[in-house]
Amino acid sequence: MSLAIDIDEVVKVNISGTWHDVHQYDEGGSSFFLDAYEFIYDSILLYGGGQEGVCATGFTFVDDDTNLKISGPLTSITAVMYNDPEENDYRATLLQMQKVD
């Protein structure tokens, strides 16, 4: 058994003790995403995940309060809150509160 977390259902992310609301797209998907991460400048790779023992897998999401992207190594996430679609459709509730069909 695993703690299968559907990244499309992530609604909050805890980083350094602060909870961030993850932007939810109108069509119902979360802006939370996992992938290898790297820092570039003018298309030149400056630093890639996995170098010097840093976790190669990173995360990114759009912060719902600031509309800015937050990205970093996966290991910097303390916890995530996510919706169990079989229990409750959190996104549908958000859209209803915003009066969006």
Image: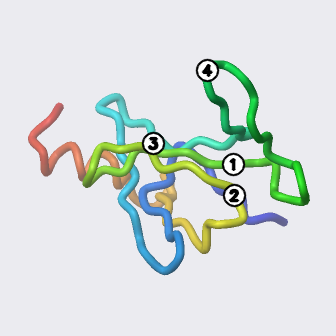
Q: CA distance from mark 3 to mark 2?
A: 17 Å
Residue lying farthest bottom? 17
Compared across the picture, whether 34 is left or right of 29 comes to: right
Q: Is residue 87 above or below residue 14?
A: above
Where residue 101 appears, as percent x and y from the top left, is: 17, 31
Where residue 12 appears, as percent x and y from the top left, is: 43, 62
- Mark 4: give few (<14), some (14-19) or many (20+) Cα within 10 Å: few
Inspect the image, locate mark 1, and give the three-letter code of the amino acid beneath it.
Answer: Gly
> What residue is pinned by disc 4?
42
Q: In this figure, what is the number of numbered marks?
A: 4
Residue lying farthest top? 43
- Res 74 label: 2
> Sequence-wise, which precedes: disc 3 or disc 4?
3
> Sequence-wise, which precedes: disc 1 or disc 4?
4
Q: Say which of 86 and 4 sits in front.
A: 4
Compared across the picture, whether 87 is left or right of 92 comes to: right
> Sequence-wise, which precedes: disc 3 or disc 2?
3
- Res 15 label: none
Q: Are marks 3 and 2 in contact (CB under 8 Å)?
A: no
Q: Is residue 25 above or below residue 77?
A: above
The residue depicted at 43 percent of the width and 75 percent of the height is 18
Q: CA distance from mark 2 to mark 4?
A: 25 Å
> What residue is pinned by disc 3?
30
Q: Say which of 1 and 66 sits in front.
A: 66
Q: Helix, strand, or loop for circle 3? A: loop
Q: CA distance from mark 3 to mark 4?
A: 29 Å
